Image (cartoon, helix red, strand yellow):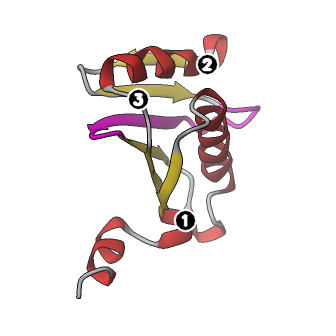
Amino acid sequence: MARLEAILTGVPGDQELRLVLEQLDPGHAGTFTWLDQRNASIALVPGTVAVPVQVLLELRGRGALGVMVTSREGMSRGAPLSRGVLEQILQRIRELLPESTLQYRSDRDGPVEQAAISHRP
């Protein structure tokens, strides 16, 4: 099962960020849903592949946004479909929020727990 994560900083406050994130609505290619005030979900079936991909967006406060992409795609081959969805979402967020900065990406930096441990003195 694929699970890819990213954290962006330098994003606007929650209310403005919610309006920006709603522009990620995939239209006929999927659904965009607010799960609560701080979490949104995008359900996709990208391309001709019948592997559903879930994108979770977490408004973390203090100018941070968490992005998680999950699917049943196997990680043994690098999960190219899920990785492609993550790339597309991050690219679209950068277009909508050019002042944001990608601080962490699990396929580049490793698991969140390892990244947190490696930065301790």
Q: Earlier in the sequence, mark 2 or mark 3?
A: 3
Where is residue 39? Give x, y as percent.
30, 28
Judged left or right of residue 116, residue 79 is: right
Whole-Å distance between the Cαs marked 3 and 1? 25 Å
Local SS, label 1: helix
The residue wearing badge 2 is 26
Q: Residue at x 48, y 26 (%)?
A: 42
SS state under label 2: loop
Say whether disc 1 or disc 2 marks the residue closer to the N-terminus. Answer: 2
Q: CA distance from mark 2 to mark 3?
A: 22 Å
Q: Spatial distance from mark 1 to mark 2, Cα to Cα?
A: 24 Å
Q: Identify the amino acid type marked 2.
A: Pro
Query: Tag 1 or tag 3, which sits nearer the N-term?
Result: 3
- Identify residue for label 3: 12
Relative horizontal placement of residue 44, taking residue 67 as reference (left or right): right
Q: Amino acid at mark 1?
A: Asp
Provide the residue designation for mark 1: 107
Q: Position of residue 17 (x, y in %)?
A: 41, 23
Position in image of residue 13 (x %, y %): 33, 27
Region of the chain picked out in magenta, as a range:
46-63
Q: How many marks?
A: 3
Residue at x 47%, y 52% (from the top left corner): 6
Q: Nearer the viewer, residue 15 or 109?
A: 15
Would you place residue 76 above or below residue 25 in this image? below
When the figure is inspected, residue 46 is found, relative to residue 121, above or below; the finding is above
